[in-house]
Amino acid sequence: MQFSSSRLWEVRDKMKKLITLLSIPLIVGALNSCEYNKNLNKEYRFNGEIKGNKVRFKSSCLWGNILKVERIDGTYLKYKSMDDFELDWVYVHKKGDKEGILYSKFNPFWEKGISEEAQKQFDEYLDTIKAINYDKALESIKE
């Protein structure tokens, strides 16, 4: 059985349309999932200062939890966890250094104390953020 090249192009175009039609529900489902999770970890959303450090926390269904800290001395830290709030990695870039260092489970220093110290810092920032957001919420309902 032999197909003409125009018939092959026709079949290919129909397959493309079918794949596109089948992928629409998947895309809509993913977007709805993100919309549902929009309020995920809302109590930790923050963009401000803590002890003079610039701090920002945001949560996303795609990227997980991200805490960014720019310390007074210029050191930049970026902490990343998923919904379990157990750190996956921390990125450290000291002022003046050409590039930063990513510490993760694949870095030999991760198990030698880096993970514990980074997790402790991450948890302390989250506790402070939650307290600040609680105080703001409480203040907003007072007369």
Image: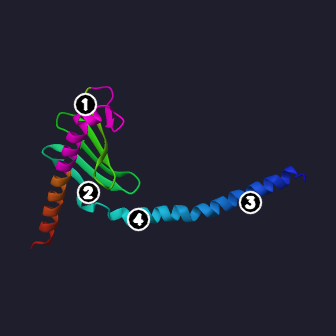
Pointer 1: what residue?
A: 94
Labelled pair 3, 2 in contact (Cβ < 8 Å): no
Q: Nearer the viewer, residue 84 or 57?
A: 84
Secondary structure, mark 1, is loop
Query: Could you tell me which secondary element the residue under label 2 belongs to?
Result: loop
Residue indicated by mark 4: 35
**Residue 70, image quadrant:** top left
Q: Amino acid at mark 4?
A: Glu
Q: Which mark is residue 45?
A: 2
Alpha-carbon span between mark 4 and mark 2: 16 Å
Magenta region, residue range: 97-125
Residue tagged 3:
14
* Residue 104 visible in image: yes
Is mark 1 in CB contact (under 8 Å) with mark 4?
no
Is tag 3's residue or tag 4's residue first in the polypeptide sequence? 3
Q: Disc 1 or 3, which lies upstream in sequence?
A: 3
Classify residue 77 as left or right of residue 124: right
Q: CA distance from mark 3 to mark 4?
A: 32 Å
The residue under label 3 is which amino acid type? Lys
Which one is earlier in the sequence, the residue at label 1 or at label 4?
Answer: 4
Q: Would you call the spot at circle 2 few (<14 residues within 10 Å), some (14-19), or many (20 or more)?
A: some
